[in-house]
Amino acid sequence: MVVPSIKYQLFNMQDESVLAKGLVERIGLEGSVLTHQPAGKDKVVLNGDIKNHSIGIKMVLDALTHPDYGVISSMKEISAVGHRVVHGGEKFADSVLITPEVMKALEDCIEMAPLHNPPNILGINACAELMPGVPQVGVFDTAFHQTMPKHAFLYGLPYEAYEKYGLRRYGFHGTSHKYVSQRAAELMGQHMSNLRIITCHLGNGASIAAVKYGKSVDTSMGFTPLEGLVMGTRSGEIDPAIIPFLMKKEGMTADQIDTYLNKKSGVLGISGVSSDFRDIEEAAAAGNERAQLALDIFAYKVKKFIGGYVAAMGGVDAIVFTAGLGENSPSMRDKICNGLEYLGTRIDPVKNNIRGKAQEISVDGAKVKIFVIPTNEELVIARDTKAICASLV
Ligand code: ADP
């Protein structure tokens, strides 16, 4: 059973500082817990019988206003709430103020994101109940990619499949691709409208986007986050004929195939070691051949997508690495970029030896710049929420 957690950050938007952040886990299960981290103070772990999202959010609000480890004196200091919503379908090309019509549209998207949208709806309803009158904003993981042209987002299926079920590429990690592409432009001292940027969000879930003149024109995840790169536990792209083959050979049901492709595949399935790249890198260094193979396959896929997106954009000015692996693994970045010299770029091994810091890592004077840029999806959500609320008054 999937138990969605609640992740939160409280921002002071006057200076964009984070006042507190935390996580509510195991909601509805035994051992449910809130981990609350007030800025500059010790972390607090609060165990409780957190039966549902409403109770979880109430605990978060209590923690934020607590006399000892709280960071605000009253809930009234919370001006707005921004929610990360995974699937906005074709209805949302930007963040929106949540209204009853928006809630209806989110419910309509449940079929496309059965794991993610229901907990989002629960979270929004819980906040509306606990903070009546406080504006709420939805920030969609799919929104940034709504600029993709039809030839990039349609599959080679009968056109009716798109009209009837909305079967098309939507793409995910949109807030991350948007944020890191904007940061890369800032670091280059240029405007997005002059740049072609390839953003590689490499975490447990992984996707790549082609951002041409500020707009996403293609991305590797599709109708769901399963498509594209080989990931921690997801297969990424495969020949679709493998699905009926396995269903027949192994007598698998549709749900079992779904679990097989989403939870048992990827670098976990290839290596047989772990879905965590740290474990795989360690095993490969100790001579485990399948761990090495998992790393080779992962890097090769990323490299092929980079090549594809250079072709899609007619060139590239910058390549950006972000998320857990992209920000923290010099060896994976090196492996991916090794062989991109034909583009006019090369990694500088000294500059590349960093973790979790925004920095250019290509050699001095490289025609195509390579960057590491830590992503910050929460900040994008907070900024969009502030902008939408400012337009209300
Ligand atoms: P998600 O948000 O998709 O769960 P993250 O962006 O937090 O994922 O990335 C998590 C992954 O990043 C981990 O599974 C791990 O494989 C990888 N990772 C994190 N730190 C390192 C590191 N120092 N070296 C190699 N891989 C790392």
Image: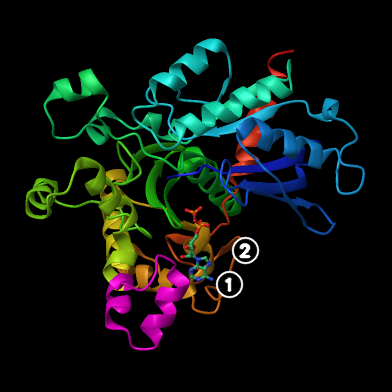
Determine the secondary structure under disc 2: loop
Q: Which residues are magenta?
A: 271-295
Relative vertical location of residue 113 with respect to residue 34 in this rendering, above or below: above
Image spot of residue 3 (x, y percent) = 50, 44
* Pointer 1 residue: 354
Q: Are marks 2 and 1 in contact (CB under 8 Å)?
A: yes
Residue at image point 28% right, 59% down: 265
Instruction: Characterize the magenta stretch by its predominant secondary structure.
Output: helix
What amino acid is labelled 2 in the image?
Answer: Lys
Residue at image point 12% right, 50% down: 251
Q: Nearer the viewer, residue 42 or 354?
A: 42
Q: Is residue 197 left or right of residue 20?
A: left
Q: Quadrant of residue 312?
A: top left
The furthest residue to the bottom = 286
Q: Can the viewer see residue 130 in this picture?
A: yes
What amino acid is labelled 1 in the image?
Answer: Ile
